[in-house]
Image: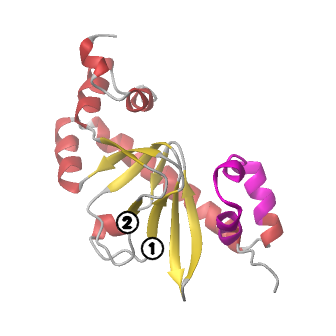
Amino acid sequence: MNSTDTLIDSDLLDFLSGFPELDKEERIAIGQKIPVREYKKGDTLVCEGEIPSECYFVLQGCVRQYYLIDGEEKTTAFFTERQAVAATNFIDQTPSKYYLVCVEDAKVIVGKIHQDEEMYKQFPKLVTITRVMIEQDFNNTREDFASFITSSPEKRYLDLLDTRPDLLNRVPQHQIASYLGITPNH
């Protein structure tokens, strides 16, 4: 590893190495331009009502998305390693209807619209890479949503055990219960 490589976050370089269409020089050049930020557990990335100026991609950690409905938090998603944090309001620059909060210490790639546009001009391969990632994420989200709304809370729990068992050790139980649509009996 040369001194140029050491200026790039190792998790970012590892992520970029997963794209065979990028050669080493491109990975290094891109890695030097992509901002990586670290957040602490409990840090808020986006608040309800705020127009997000950034979007995120998780390199390490866990970010929770939730809505505040009648004073109660309703968890709708957990984003972990190698997942884009849904920031629909980032694209259309409208106020967010939800919160994004770090459940764990997190290291994320930070995107800004003007920086992304400059990167696409400088590295045209990123347009295709990003498009493929967005399409895959959209298809996965659509499938997850369809499965979620047609399943009982018990089936959702079994699916979670099957597809994302790590969340059970990373996320407080009340947040998992909220995500699954399980409420305590009174």
The answer to whether 172 appears left or right of 19 in the picture is: right
In the picture, the quarter occupied by the N terminus is top left
- Residue, disc 1: 98
Give the distance between the C-alpha atoms of the residues marked 2 and 1, in whole angstroms. Answer: 8 Å
Residue 59 pos. (x, y %): 46, 40
**Residue at screen point 30% across, 18% down:** 5
Judging from the image, what secondary structure is the residue with disc 1 in? loop
Q: Main secondary structure of the magenta part?
A: helix
The question of residue 178 being in magenta is answered with: yes
Q: Nearer the viewer, residue 13 or 61?
A: 61
Name the quadrant of the C terminus.
Answer: bottom right
Question: Residue 54, percent across and down?
Answer: 29, 57
Taking the spot 50% from the left edge, 42% from the top edge, the residue there is 82
- At label 2, the amino acid type is Val
Check whether the beta carbons of the residues at disc 2 and disc 1 lie within 8 A of each other: yes
In the rendered structure, the answer to whether residue 124 lies left or right of residue 147 reads left
Q: Depth check: 47 or 33 in front?
A: 47
Of residue 124 and residue 92, the one placed in the foreground of this image is 92
Question: In this figure, which residue is indicated by the disc labeled 2?
Answer: 46
Decide: is 46 above or below 34: below
